[in-house]
Amino acid sequence: MQAKIQRQIAFIKTHNFTNDFDWRSRVEAMETLLEHLPEQMTVDSLRGIEGSASRHYFECFGAMLTRLSFGGRIRIYPLCADCGAKVTVLGYRPPIVTESGYVVV
C-alpha cells in the first residue's frame, strides 16, 4: 500500500496542471497519510488510509482530465447477468478451483 500511494503521488507531481486546481494540498494530505501508515494496527484502519489516499488521487486525476468528462471513480460495479465477462474485460482473472483441487489462473 505504501508503494501504491507513493506512485500515485509521483504521478500527480509529473502532471502540469493548467487550471487553478490545488493539487499540492492533496499531495500533502497523501504524504501525511503515508506518515501515519506504520501506526495502523488493524485492516480496517489500513483500508481507511487507502480509501482517503484514493479519494485525493482521484480528485487530482479528475482535474488532469479537464478536456474529458470524468465524474470520478466507480466504487461498486453494478451487478449484471454476465459479470464474469465484464470482470475479464477489466483485466481481472480470478483463480478457478477445479473439482480435483487444482487452481487454474
Image (spheres, helix red, strand yellow):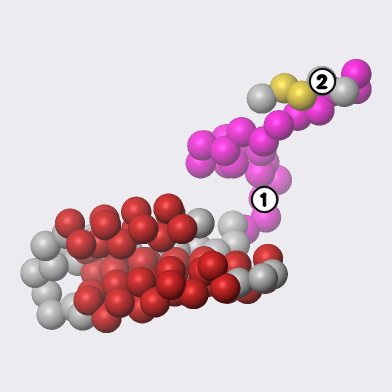
Answer above or below: position of 49 versus 103.
Answer: below
Find residue 69 and report its horizontal and vertical position in percent. Answer: 28, 64
Which residue lies under the disc numbered 1?
80
Residue 80 pos. (x, y %): 67, 50
Say which label, 2 or 1, has the lower sequence index: 1
Determine the image quadrant of residue 100: top right
Asked if 52 appears above or below 8 in the picture, the reply is below
Q: Which SS class for mark 2?
A: loop
- Whether the magenta-drawn stretch holds residue 12 is answered as no
Residue occupied by mark 2:
102
Amino acid tagged 1: Cys
Q: State which region is magenta.
A: 78-100
Q: Which residue is at a point 61% across and 33% down the rendered structure image? A: 93
Looking at the image, residue 51 sits to the left or right of residue 29; the answer is right
* Visible residue check, residue 66: yes
How many angstroms separate mark 2 from mark 1 (CA)?
28 Å
Circle 1 residues within 10 Å: few <14, some 14–19, many ≥20 = few
Q: Quadrant of residue 99?
A: top right
Give the overall secondary structure of the magenta segment.
loop
Secondary structure under the numbered disc 1 in the rendered image? loop
- The residue under the point 13% across, 67% down is 17
Q: Which mark is residue 89?
A: none
Q: Amino acid at mark 2?
A: Tyr
Identify which residue is drawn at 71% across, 31% down. Answer: 95
Image x and y of residue 23, in percent: 23, 74
The residue at the far right in this view is 99
Neighbours of disc 2 within 10 Å: few (<14), some (14-19), many (20+): few
* Figure check: 20 above or below 87: below
For the residue pair 66 and 13, the one nearer the viewer reads as 13
Residue 67 on image: x %, y %: 17, 62
- Classify residue 7 by image quadrant: bottom left
